[in-house]
Amino acid sequence: MNPFDSTDIAYAKQYKYNGIDDSICKKLFLAKYWDWCMRFIPMNVAPNVITLIGFIVESISFVLSLVLTNGLTKQLPCYGCVINALCLFFYQTLDNLDGRQARRTGMSSPLGQFFDHGCDAITGVSEVIKSAAVFNMGVEDVYFYYAFFTGITFVLTSYEEYVTHKFYLGKFNAPDEGLLILVILYLTIAAFPSIVPTIRPYFLFAYILGQIFTNLLIFIHVIQFCWKEKECRKRAFLAPIPMFISATIICLMKFLFGSTTNSVFFIMATEFILTYNSQTVIISYLVKRAPLRLIDPLTIMLWVASSISFVFKSTSFVQNGYYWMVLCAIVFSTMILTDVRVVIGFTKGLKIPAFHVIPKEEPRSDDSKNKIQPKQKKTSHSVSFRAH
């Protein structure tokens, strides 16, 4: 079933990427490194293929980390830390090259934007698991907070873009500096594994504090934006509601079930629920859906699937952790199903391929001379959303 109607596609055709990256590391050396890497990518390679390769590499290292640590119950070997570092750096590189390839080939589109975000949503969860394996966090309560605030930040980043229509990365941001720090820490731990118990508390404290501070900055930025753009206020107020409902259900499960939730599957299930909320926000942003559309049938289904655990709290199926495995499978399958439906919907609606490049047609000289340029209309920063 196509998730988009003709109005959705009409709005999707108007979409233009609006992103700014003020990263210090990018200005110092990353941009030059990415430019150098672009020399080795042929023009006939589709941007989504680059994204997919990075996603596959990151997924392989994620599965390897789970296997080598027996589900985060023991320390990751040194060679596993090195593999995680190399795969993460490779993924970060390709995550930047796909956008450059899209602009170079003229293939920038809502399809590419969503495909990139969909892969990031899944790899974001996998990277949380991988970092837990490297730092030997186990599945105790502190790891829950580490993963929970990561998921909240991921949703709020999409929320900020949905309200302000701009994706902004500051001078010190997670995709650039944050991932580089993780790569360095992974390699350091691989060389000196005995330092893990010493640096783990400091890492967790700095990370969680940084996530809270980032989320506060997002809300402050949204409030400042809505103060100037009154049309955005309703959207800004309603859009976070699904995230708050999901977060409430997750916290209730954690505190009511206690040690029963000390499972890697519980962590993954809760992370996937939050990242699915982020996906619905991005879809609504790309096709300008009203905020109430964020509460879709699949979101409600995930809330119900999570809440069923309260009814069967005392059963062995929940107490032994089997329920978290089922819930994780349900949420992950929902994300994959949504990703596939959206990609197919954009491919058909926008009439653009997902995994190959459309050759550019050079304009004829006589056409370029006789072509009349349309007058540009002045537009404000606020973009109207449909009322549903």
Image (tube, helix red, strand yellow):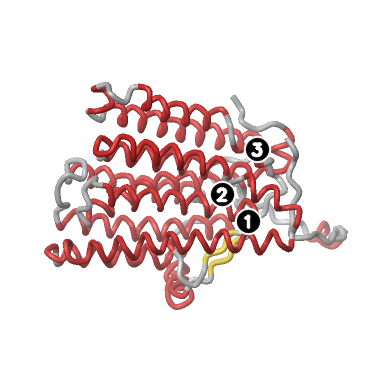
Q: Is residue 9 above or below residue 166?
A: above
Nearest to the eye among marks 3 and 1: give it.
3
Q: CA distance from mark 3 to mark 1?
A: 23 Å
Question: For mark 3, what is the residue?
Answer: 292
In the image, which disc is placed on residue 17?
Answer: 1
Q: CA distance from mark 1 to mark 2?
A: 8 Å
378 and 237: which is toward the camera:
237
Q: Position of residue 185 (x, y in %)?
A: 26, 65
Q: Quadrant of the N terminus?
A: top right
In the image, which disc is placed on residue 339?
Answer: none
Sequence-wise, the earlier of marks 1 and 2 is: 1
201 and 76: which is toward the camera:
201
Q: CA distance from mark 3 to mark 2?
A: 22 Å
Q: Is residue 249 above or below residue 18?
A: above
Q: Quadrant of the C terminus?
A: top right
Q: Is residue 205 above or below residue 148?
A: below
Q: Position of residue 76 (x, y in %)?
A: 17, 52
What's under tag 1, amino acid-wise?
Tyr
203 and 7: which is toward the camera:
203
Q: Is residue 27 above or below residue 69?
A: below
**Helix, strand or loop at mark 2:** helix
375 and 302: which is toward the camera:
302
The image quarter containing residue 327 is top left
What's under tag 3, amino acid-wise?
Leu
**Helix, strand or loop at mark 1:** loop
Question: Which residue is drawn at the image coordinates 63% and 33% (left, top)?
Answer: 348
Sequence-wise, the earlier of marks 3 and 2 is: 2
Tell whether label 2 touches label 1 (CB within 8 Å): yes
Question: For mark 2, what is the residue?
Answer: 113
